[in-house]
Image: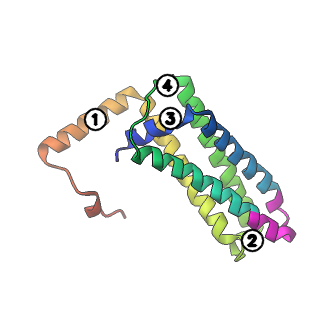
Amino acid sequence: MCQLSVAVAVLNNFGNDQWNADVYDTMALASRLSTLVKDRSKTIGISYRLYGLNSKLNALFKQIYARLEGPAGEERVFTPEETQDAIRSLRKLCGLLDTLFEAGRRSRLTNNSLTASWLNSIHVYSDELQELAQIIELTLDEYHLKFVYERASKERESGDVFDISQIEIK
């Protein structure tokens, strides 16, 4: 699946009011959690809320993957302002999740069996959201997009195409 199709699927979801509500609801939950994390005495409550935040993030990604794997729905053209707003929303959510993780790490919640897995999972989701924001941002640069497609065409013509399972990342 190419990065452009990921960006288009995500942007199509951002046109949906339910998607925006989910993203902002996740931000609100992360903000509430970051205030609780500073007080370790409420570890069980924090664990429960971290589970809830993790579930919301999981649902957001399931929605993205379902959109990618499902049939193409209605396509609409997004203005650069709408796209920038989507990028800002994703980056703000990433910032909140990173702040939450760092506060949890400073409070030694990453060493607690009740909270460590949820915090680490949320940190991974934050990285994935940041990557998604970068992919969407790349779609705004027409010169870069044209360059990517031209390079891909040249590589395909010259036979420099590899199966993704053969690529080893170091």
CB-based contact (under 8 Å), mark 1 and mark 2: no
Dot 1: few (<14), some (14–19), or many (≥20) neighbours within 10 Å? few
Compared to 136, does 128 lie above or below? below
| Disc ID at residue 78 | 4
Q: Which residues are magenta?
A: 36-48
Residue 8, how many percent across, how many down?
44, 36
Kind of residue indicated by mark 1: Tyr
CB-based contact (under 8 Å), mark 1 and mark 4: no
Residue picked out by circle 3: 11
Q: Earlier in the sequence, mark 2 or mark 4?
A: 4
Nearer the observer: mark 1 or 2; the answer is 1
Answer left or right for 109 relative to 63.
right
CB-based contact (under 8 Å), mark 4 and mark 3: yes
Residue picked out by circle 1: 149
Q: Quadrant of residue 48?
A: bottom right
Dot 4: few (<14), some (14–19), or many (≥20) neighbours within 10 Å? some
Kind of residue indicated by mark 2: Arg
Q: Earlier in the sequence, mark 1 or mark 2?
A: 2
Residue 155, how many percent across, how many down?
19, 43
